[in-house]
Structure formats: structure tokens, C-alpha cells
């Protein structure tokens, strides 16, 4: 059975598969299973036995940890061309975190057996996986540092500043869109919804931001950035 052109195109964009020959990409594409996920649907749950690797074709997925009382901490959000769940393919352990679709998403699944077969004949793939996993480890260290040494206000401002880099410039300032719920934002910065709402209200009262529903306008980005130095 010939692989679909779409599957070939998606797999070619995945960093850990860069440098594969056309035959090797076809080997994966022929075996990749396309799955459709709806908003909030789980790809896998923390503690599940690892069955394979996931590659995002369209949409986004969030990787997160959950506490016994139901609180979530988002570790990262991955989009098209990203691979997910590389680590347990190599250490033989379970999935170390849960992953769910942010909205509707199309995901390719590659079984652990097929991935191991590729690695046996193409040893540069594990090295590329190590680079991706290393980048994620550095990001996790940054998350730990933020949660340990910064305030909720500081973490919230950091998120607003990051979003502003891709925001829309208007006559009133830089316009950005917040997640659909304050709970999502709370999960991203490691706090509870009530503290997110309270700190957004304070930032608005201080005229550092203005809000219209989930649309936030930052009138003076430099002033907001300066607040990071005083909100630790």
C-alpha cells in the first residue's frame, strides 16, 4: 500500500526525521495511522504503557501533569510538525505526562515496534530524539525555576509579554487573545483560576492592560516588561 502524499509531507517536517532517505520516510508513512481528536480528547494519560510516537499534522496538543486534586500544570503546547512521547520509547517506561488535543487535531501514530525498526537501521534518529528531548528538559527546568522563584503576577506578565511578540499592533497598543478560560491560563502558569482573575483585574486597574472579553490590549509593552523586575 502506497503512503499518502500528506503523510509523507508531514513526516518530512518532523525534526527527528530530518535527513531520512525517501525510502525510510516511506517506511514510516506506510505504517503511520491517522487519528482525529476533538477538543479535550486525550491522546494518552500519564502512567499508561507506551505504545508509540505521535506526530501532529494539524491542530495543537497540550502536554500536562495533573495533581491528585485535579490541578493541572501545562508543560508545553505542541503544534503541526511536532513529535510527542519520544522519551518512553527509549527508557521502556510509561508515559510521564498526559497529552490532550487543544482543539480539533489530526495526529499520526507510529507504533513503538515500527519506530525501533527504523532506529536499528538509522542510528542518527536516536541522536535527533536526544536533541529534542534535551530541549524539552531545558524548558522544564525553566518551568521549575518560574514556579519556585517567581510570583503569580510575574508569571502572568511573562505570558502576556510572550504573546505580545505575535500580537496585533493597533492604535491602542498590542492586541492579544487569551485562552478561552482563565483555568487554561492558570494551568499554564501553575496557579488557580481565582488568582489569574484577580491579577488580570489588578493589571487592568493599573492601566497596564485593557480587556474586552478575552481580547487584551497592552498600551505600553515596555512599561509591562518593566513590571517583571518589580513583581518578583
Image (tube, helix red, strand yellow):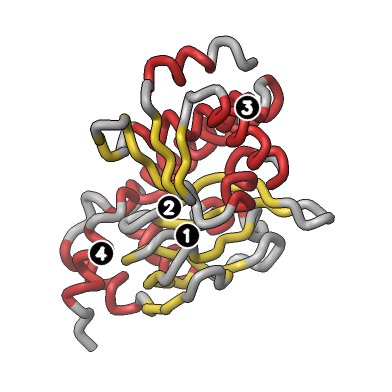
Query: How far apart are labels 2 and 3 at the CA level?
Result: 25 Å
Query: How far apart are labels 1 and 3 at the CA level?
Result: 26 Å
* Mark 3: few/some/many CA within 10 Å (<14, 14-19, 20+): many
Q: In this figure, which residue is indicated by the disc labeled 2?
A: 78
Query: How far apart are labels 2 and 1 at the CA level?
Result: 5 Å
Marks 1 & 3, CB-CB < 8 Å contact:
no
Q: Report the side of 232 relative to 126 (left or right).
A: right
The N terminus sits in image quarter: bottom left
Q: In this figure, which residue is indicated by the disc labeled 1?
A: 61
Give x and y (percent) for residue 145.
63, 24
Query: How far apart are labels 4 and 2 at the CA level?
Result: 14 Å
The answer to whether one can see residue 142 in this image is: no
Q: In this figure, which residue is indicated by the disc labeled 4?
A: 10
Q: In this figure, which residue is indicated by the disc labeled 3?
A: 153
Say what secondary structure mark 2 lies in.
strand
Between 154 and 32, the one lying in front of the other is 154
Residue at image coords 59%, 24%? 154
Between 3 and 174, the one lying in front of the other is 174
Say what secondary structure mark 4 lies in.
helix
The label nearer to you, 1 versus 3, is 3
Say what secondary structure mark 1 lies in.
strand
User: In the picture shown, does residue 161 fall above or below 15?
Assistant: above
Choose the circle earlier in sequence order: 4 or 2: 4
The label nearer to you, 2 versus 3, is 3
Amino acid at each position: 500500500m502506497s503512503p499518502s502524499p500528506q503523510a509523507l509531507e508531514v513526516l518530512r517536517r518532523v525534526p527527528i526525521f530530518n535527513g531520512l532517505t525517501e525510502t525510510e520516510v516511506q517506511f514510516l508513512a506506510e505504517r503511520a495511522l491517522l487519528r482525529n481528536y476533538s477538543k479535550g480528547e486525550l491522546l494518552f494519560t500519564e502512567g499508561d504503557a507506551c505504545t508509540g510516537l505521535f506526530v501532529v499534522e494539524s491542530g495543537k496538543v497540550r502536554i500536562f501533569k495533573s495533581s491528585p486534586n485535579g490541578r493541572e500544570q501545562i508543560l508545553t503546547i505542541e503544534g503541526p510538525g511536532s513529535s510527542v512521547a519520544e522519551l518512553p520509547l527509549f527508557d521502556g517506561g510509561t508515559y510521564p505526562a498526559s497529552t490532550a488535543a487543544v482543539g480539533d487535531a489530526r495526529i499520526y501514530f507510529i507504533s513503538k515496534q515500527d519506530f525501533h525498526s527504523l532506529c536499528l537501521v538509522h542510528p542518527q534518529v536516536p541522536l535527533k530524539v536526544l536533541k529534542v528531548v534535551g530541549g524539552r528538559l531545558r524548558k522544564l527546568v525553566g518551568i521549575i525555576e518560574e514556579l519556585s522563584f517567581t510570583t503569580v503576577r510575574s508569571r502572568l506578565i511573562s505570558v502576556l509579554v510572550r504573546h505580545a511578540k505575535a500580537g496585533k499592533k493597533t492604535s491602542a497598543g498590542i492586541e492579544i487573545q487569551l485562552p478561552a478560560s482563565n483555568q487554561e491560563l492558570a494551568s499554564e502558569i501553575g496557579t488557580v483560576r481565582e488568582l489569574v482573575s484577580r491579577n488580570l483585574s489588578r493589571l487592568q486597574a493599573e492601566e497596564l492592560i485593557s480587556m474586552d472579553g478575552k481580547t487584551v490590549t497592552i498600551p505600553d509593552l515596555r512599561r509591562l516588561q518593566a513590571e517583571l523586575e518589580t513583581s518578583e
